[in-house]
Image (cartoon, grey):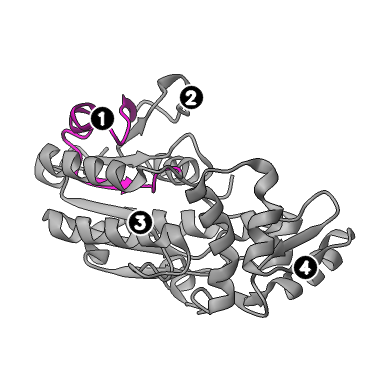
Amino acid sequence: MDSTRTSSDSPRLVAVTGATGALGGRVAAALAADGVPLRLVVRDASRAPSLGEHVDIAVASYADRAAARTALEGVETLFMVSAAEAVDRLDQHRTFVDAAVEAGVRHIVYTSFQGAAPDAVFTLARDHAATEQHLLASGAATTFLRDSFYLDALIDFADAEGVIRGPAGEGRVAAVARADVADAAVAVLRDPSAHRGAAYDLTGPEALSLAELAARLTTATGRGHTFVDETLDEAYASRAAWNPEPYIADAWVSTYASIASGEVSGVSTAVRDLTGHDPLTLEQLVSGSAGRTARR
């Protein structure tokens, strides 16, 4: 470290949530490699990655306001990965945001969703819209990363026979690789003040119908894939075997319905603008040809 550096211009502490998961883990690893002072806020310290002496661990859940406030004390910038699907997810988000503000966090970078709106077809995007509104009213600076559906997840929607089924019709989705979302988040967190008040739609390089996705998966993997379009009633019926909670069933079905509606068809240049590289194509993701910093 430069011995002439003063306390006023020393690196500011960044807190990262979700570090035990695919997205937060990539972001934390990339920032740690840069030497950014980090605090990983996790629910289980035993699962936290070991990233070096300048990275510390704090334990808190989104729903525990007191623990979250303690965990975030001294933090300048918070990377807030949206909580796992739960009936009270919005309440968790609001509690955590309030705790962050009480702890003195100045800037919150939140992983939202493309097309987040109170009346979004994708039911979980409504939670994201409400969280954004709570963040805007909190007094903290904000940056919203509105990612599309994960391309990684869409690939995994195929069943054992390679069938992707749902009421998507001929709609298109500009799905984005998790690695590209991680790279974009890292770019923002390296210089948060440059992105104060911004909202970025993070998408892949193209919008595909699920029939096109299936055809390209067949070519890329050598394994047959097909898309079966369902009605809404058929979609609920075909998922009933898992006995999902009603809000989960709605989320599953509305994933496809939002594609049919066109809500997630827009293609953005934000990944390239933020990171300097093009977002991954389906073929690159399948082949594993992602040799970039946050893609470990």
Badge 3, how many Cα within 10 Å: few under 14, some, many 20+? Answer: many
Looking at this view, is 213 or 121 the one in front? 121
Which residue has dot 4 on it?
227
Contact, mark 1 vs mark 2 (Cβ under 8 Å)? no
Q: Amino acid at mark 4?
A: Phe
Q: Amino acid at mark 2?
A: Arg
Which residue has dot 1 on it?
64
Which residue has dot 2 on it?
47
Q: Which of the marked residues, 1 or 4, is nearer the chain's N terminus?
A: 1
Contact, mark 3 vs mark 1 (Cβ under 8 Å)? no
Q: CA distance from mark 1 to mark 2?
A: 19 Å
Q: CA distance from mark 1 to mark 4?
A: 42 Å
Q: Is 77 colored magenta in this rendering?
A: yes
Q: Residue at x 14, y 54 (%)?
A: 138
Looking at this view, is 87 or 6 the one in front? 87
In this orientation, does residue 115 appear?
yes
In x, y percent, where is residue 173?
59, 73
> Which dot marks residue 94?
none
Q: Secondary structure at mark 2?
A: helix
Q: Secondary structure at mark 3?
A: helix
Q: Which of the marked residues, 3 or 2, is nearer the chain's N terminus?
A: 2
